[in-house]
Amino acid sequence: MMEGRPEGESMARRSLEQQPPADRTAFLPAVDEAPHGVLFYEGDRFLIDSVVRFLSEGLQAGQAVIAIATRAHRQRLEHGLTEAGFDVAQLRRDAHLIMVDASEALASVLRDRRPDPERFAAIIDEVLDRVAADAAGVRVFGEMSALLVEDGEDEAALALEQLAEDRRAALGLPLLCAYPMRAFEGEHSGETFQRVCSVHEQVVPSESYSELHDANERARAVAILQQEAVAGINARVSLRHSQHALEEELRLLRALDRLHREVQATVVHDARRATGDPDHQRPRSVETLQKTATRVVRRTLSAAACHIARTQARHDRDARDVRRDEGGIAVPIRARGAVRRMLVVELGPDRDLDHDEEWFLHAVAELLGVAIEHDEAHAELTQRSLHDELTGLPNRTLLWDRLDHALRRHERTGGCLAVLALDVDDFSDVNERLGEQAADQVLAMIAERLSDALSPGDTIARLGGDTFVIVAEDLDQPSEALGIAQRLRTALAPALVLGDAAVELTASVGITVGDPLDGADSLLGSADLALQHAKRRPDGRWAMLDASDALRTPAI
């Protein structure tokens, strides 16, 4: 397989040397190196351009290339290689280009949600055996570990990376892995990110850095990162004790300023997100701020211990006052006019607070109260922005996001996904007969009945008026969607009682079966089209567009 080049060359190989691909990215391994590299990306364009160059350099040198990628990425890689001047079909026939489905390969490698070394070796050997005997070497691109990280299986991903590194080192072939930056957005993902970097010999930063072509821009970006690193280290260093009153006051103010900046960073994050700023930083949670506060207080005051205590005595006057005893002090944390927590400091024997230190504790408690108020206000704002105010169901924005995530999972795991659009028949008559306020109550009751009729993993959203959309995942076959439609219509069959009025309702349902390549907008449009077919039928009921866009309208 890797014994050197023959005297003759295939047409595909000659085509490669006649039309070398453009150098569109930087920092990728050279052809004569054999590193284990990792590339981070924010958008698919940078990923595809980088991997196409990585594969093209190998093909240009007479190597065979293997891409273990998702279905969508494989298609775009083949398109990119074709645009670069390669005859993809000929390369496939000559076994110089081998494409492997990452999801299928990953499923074969895992045992009890962990990568099995024997299975991994068998999969890799089977793929390598397919490589042409005249290839001058092999280079591999893979994203199986990235799929595990996106699914929250960090330890399994790192174990798979180690298996890949051991195999790569034994064979001496270049291996490039890739991870989307969105996979490391979690609050505790920093350690995983660092461990992924440490496994690889070479790290390619995402396009926000790699696409900075000017040396000064790159130097500026590095300087900013260095400053942030120094600031982070300095923020974790406790303030030193001082012998002078002014230095003591400055020490307290600096500690307090640190907490103030962290609270302010949370507010700035949400303000930037509200204006669509893509460079906002993720906020710290209130729990994280509280832990930081107790650590700062303990170190600043040399206290024996410090913690945040919950209190139920929101209306107890005693809970609103500072409590002191021989062992320490408890300062109330107020938010929205009520005591939410107590900042409890244990001072130890023969230790008392001076005026400045007590002021410091009150200021810390006030900052934590501000953080709690902001956190609650932000949660309420998020709830209103993503949910229908009348029914509490997800709105169009949240529905689109959940459907998009469901399609990504569907692409990796298979199964069947259906989208159902439901309209209440002749609901305008209810509005005219009972009035707008009563009609709103009826809509809320309809939403509750429909929600109760669904499985826990399904999503139901209200798009406005009397239109609801349901996303049903993990179906074994498309026909199960008909059963869901039946349950929804049955749930509305009993009359709704509103005061002295009894409201009888029926509904029409449009159904479509999901394909990950269609996209969320396309599926929602297909479900709406099926709904219009259903509403035009004399008996209403339902209509279904299957995967081939064939219309089915049997009676339920």
Image (spheres, grey):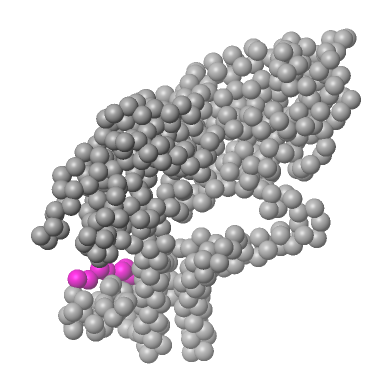
Q: Is residue 521 above or below residue 282?
A: above
Q: Residue 296: which quarter of the image? A: bottom left
Q: Residue at x 38, y 70 (%)?
A: 377
Front-lying residue, 66 or 124: 66
Residue 509 image point, x, y percent: 34, 39
Residue drawn at (76%, 57%) of the image: 218
**Looking at the rendering, in which quadrant would you find the N terminus?**
top right
Q: Which residues are magenta?
A: 305-312
Residue drawn at point x = 68 percent, y = 63 percent: 224
- In the drawing, does residue 165 fall left or right of residue 402? right
Q: Is residue 527 left or right of residue 450?
A: right
Residue toward you, 487 or 301:
487
| Quadrant housing the C terminus | top left
- Closest to the observer, 334 or 102: 102
Residue 536 visible at all: yes
Residues 390 and 506: in front is 506
Q: In the rendered view, tell whether residue 431 sits above or below residue 185.
A: below
Say if 8 sits above or below 25 in the image.
Answer: above
